[in-house]
Structures are given as structure tokens and as C-alpha cells.
Image: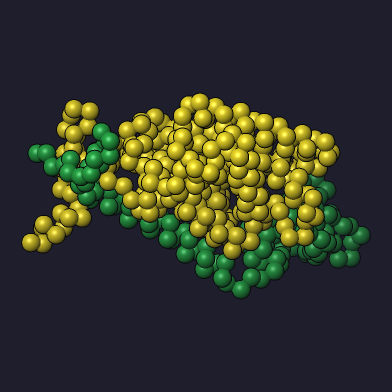
Chain colours: A green, B yellow
Amino acid sequence: MSKTDSDHDDGDEKVHDDPPTIVEWVTRLAAAVLVIGLFGYLLWHATDLNKPAAFDFTVEGDKAERMGTVWRTPVTVTNTGDEGVKELKISADVPGVKQTYTLLVSQIGPGERYDFTLFLQDDPRELPPVFRVESHQ
Amino acid sequence: MLVSRVHRFISPLNTRIPVDGDMLPLWKLELYSLNRAFCGALLVALPLLYTMEMWDRPRLLPGWLVVLWMIFGVFLCAAFFLFSGFRKENLKRSVVLDGVTSMGVGIFASAMTLLLIGRYQWGESLDIIARLVALESVPTGMGASVAISQLGGRGAVARSNPASRINPDLRALLATFLGALLFSFNIAPTVEHQVIAQSVGGWHVAGIALFSLITSWLLVFHTRTEGVSGDERVALTDTFSSTIFSYLSALIASYAMLWLFGYLTPGMPLHLQVVHTIILGYAATLGGAAGRILL
């Protein structure tokens, strides 16, 4: 079967005028869904009210473990705002104990979390550390 | 009646067309084209998919700028289709639909590669993933749109390119601009141009600008000897004007890239913006001249 070669001549090249098959249409549809879906998601987030960067700290006390004289304590900081920040400087104080820890996170995007570990002198379940954001860009 | 109406938009799967003396199924040629787009996407963008700064930029760019990137990406893909594409055979083309397909292929290729190289972790913010894929899909989409120029076979479609109907001067400038964007995309997101901008003096910057102009002149001259971009130009007929306009196109492309990547901010002193643009402009100039040869 030879359906084809209708069409306008462009020098010695001919453009086949057959419409695409279902294969091409499915490809186009899938591509359009991907583009519109991603674009829609980003647009929806971009037009949402932009909350400034804010940070939520979670001390995973149940995962803390004693290592010799210190407590290895996993901590998670989450950026709950809609803006990313660079060079986030965090301090952690343990109440009643003269012990301050500082940490620098190079960057943390919107909704993103960053895990780090503190080595505390006391059990974090009894004396949980208090976190402070010192600065960020 | 209904069947004939459907067949105006969808060819039956048993449709065959002549290619190099053989009758090949149309659906198979369409799959070859898609495969070409996918490979072209990765050939252009794989270095960027492996670049740390590209992973980091989505964390710091405002949401509206990422949206702007996607719009810019779709327009760029469509613009590249004026010159190139991913269809080797002279199949019916649509600049808009093929541009969207390129972008879709770019999204798929980016998402798959980023997944395979462990860029998404369990519990990762969906917002960050979406931004990262969107940003990476621009160069991958551009790669899909110029697959023919990369993988050979462009000669078969060159005559029917929609760009052949554009004013020759405008065509040359557009090819320069697109080539500049494509080439400088590999450098624009990195921090190296920032490091260079902080370490060079006025003489270096003047030297880079002069050397860019000379390189551009050499490449434009080369383009003319190859006869690419045609001799039917009306305004940009001499080497001098051609070189100056090529360089200006490259500088505009550089400025746009730096701004879209968030490296140029409104509070930044003007002279620093100029220095950054000239430094990236060197790469863009080479890309612009190459664009006129390849596209």
C-alpha cells in the first residue's frame, strides 16, 4: 500500500502529507500532559501566597543513642516557607547546661528538610535542645 | 463517513511511505523520530544533569522565575524547530506540536536521569523535584529540538525548514541567538563565571570583549566561506556589521541566561552586570557563530 507523496515540492524534497498515526498522537498527548501538568503545578505554587522562609526543628529523641559519654541525637530542620535560603546558621542551646552548638546549612529550599546530628552531654528526651536561627541569606 | 473523517487526522497503522527506495511503516518512522529526540536531548543536556549548580539553583530561584523558565523553554523548543527538529524523513511537521513534544521528551529524559543518579530522596520536597525537573527540561528539550543537527541527516529536511521562509537577516540573527543560548547554557548555571568576574580586572574584561569580537569575526567569516545562512541577506551583508550584530545577540542571550538563573539581581551594580555578561558572552559568541553553521 502506498499512500503518500502528495504535496508540495520544495526543490527535490517532498513533504509527505499523511497525518500522523495513533503512535504519534499518543506521544504528543503524553508530552502535552507532562508539560501542562508540570507547568500547572509550578504555576499553582508560584501564585500561592509566598510565605517567607521559616524553620521547624524536630529532635528525634527516640532515635538518640548513647555513645560513651555523649548522646548521638538526630535532628531534622524543615523549611516550611516558600522561599529558599543560603547559609542558614543555626544555634542549639541545652537549657540549664552551658553548651551551645552552631551549624551552617549551605542551602535549603522551600519545603525541604535537612538532617544533622548533635552530640549532646545529656539525654535529649530529658533535656531537649532549644534551636535558634542566627542568620541566613 | 466517520472513518474518512478520522483518517484526515490519523493515518492507519498500515500506512507506509517511501524512504531511500524502501516502503517503511509510518508508525515505525515516528518511533525512530521519538528515539532521535530522546537521544538528542541527553547528548546536549547530560553534562547539565550532572552539574551540582543545576541541582542547587531550583532551591534558590523564586517560583515565578521557574514558571518563566518553562515558558521560555517551550518557546525555545518551538524556535529551534524553525531550523532543525528530530524528524529525518520529510514527515509532516508542526512547530508548536513538535515543540511541545520536545519539551515533553525533555521532562521525561530529565526526570529519569535525575531519578537514576539519586537526585530525589525519600521524603524530598515535591516542590524542589518539580522545579529541578522543570529547569533541567529546558536544555534537554532544546537537545531534542536539534536532534537532527546533532545526529546527522539534516540535509534531508533543510529545504523544507520553516526558517527558510524567514527574512535572511532575521534568520541569521535568530540562529545566532539560539546557538548562543544553547552553548552558554552549559556555563551559565555554574559558579565559575562568578569566580572569574570577581578575579578579573578591567583589562581582562576589555580583552575578553575584544577577543570575543575577533573570534566571532573569524567564525562569521568561516560561515560565509561555507555559504551557510545564505548570501541573500540584505542588511547584514558585510563581515563587520554581521560580527557586531552577532556579538550583540550573544550578549543579549548571556544577559537573559544570567538573569533567569538569578545571578543578576536588580540591586547588583551595573558595572558588575556588564562584567558578568561579557564573561559569559565569550561562550555565547562561540555558540552563536556555531548556531549559524549548525542550525
In the picture provided, is A42 more to the left or to the right than B245?
Answer: left
User: Closer to the camera, A30 or B228?
Assistant: B228
Q: Residue at x 83, y 36 (%)?
A: B203
Which quadrant holds the C terminus of chain A?
Answer: bottom right
User: Closer to the camera, B205 or B247?
Assistant: B247
The percent coordinates of residue A92 (x first, y second) are 82, 60
Which quadrant holds the N terminus of chain A?
Answer: top left
Q: Residue at x 57, y 35 (%)?
A: B238
Q: Quadrant of residue A60?
A: bottom right
In the image, residue B67 sits, relative to residue A67, either above or below, namely below
The percent coordinates of residue B248 (x first, y second) are 63, 45
In the picture provided, is B2 more to the left or to the right than B226?
Answer: left
User: Closer to the camera, B30 or B119?
Assistant: B30
Q: Residue at x 39, y 43 (%)?
A: B164
- Tally the marks: 0
Residue B4 is at least partly visible in this image = yes
User: Closer to the camera, B197 or B179?
Assistant: B179
Q: Residue at x 54, y 33 (%)?
A: B290
The percent coordinates of residue A113 (x first, y second) are 65, 57
In the image, residue A30 sits, relative to residue B83, either above or below, namely below
Farthest residue, direction bottom: A49
In the picture provided, is B224 more to the left or to the right than B28?
Answer: right
Residue A60 is at least partly visible in this image = no
The percent coordinates of residue B124 (x first, y second) are 57, 55
In the image, residue B56 sits, relative to residue A93, either above or below, namely above
In the picture provided, is B101 more to the left or to the right than B244?
Answer: left
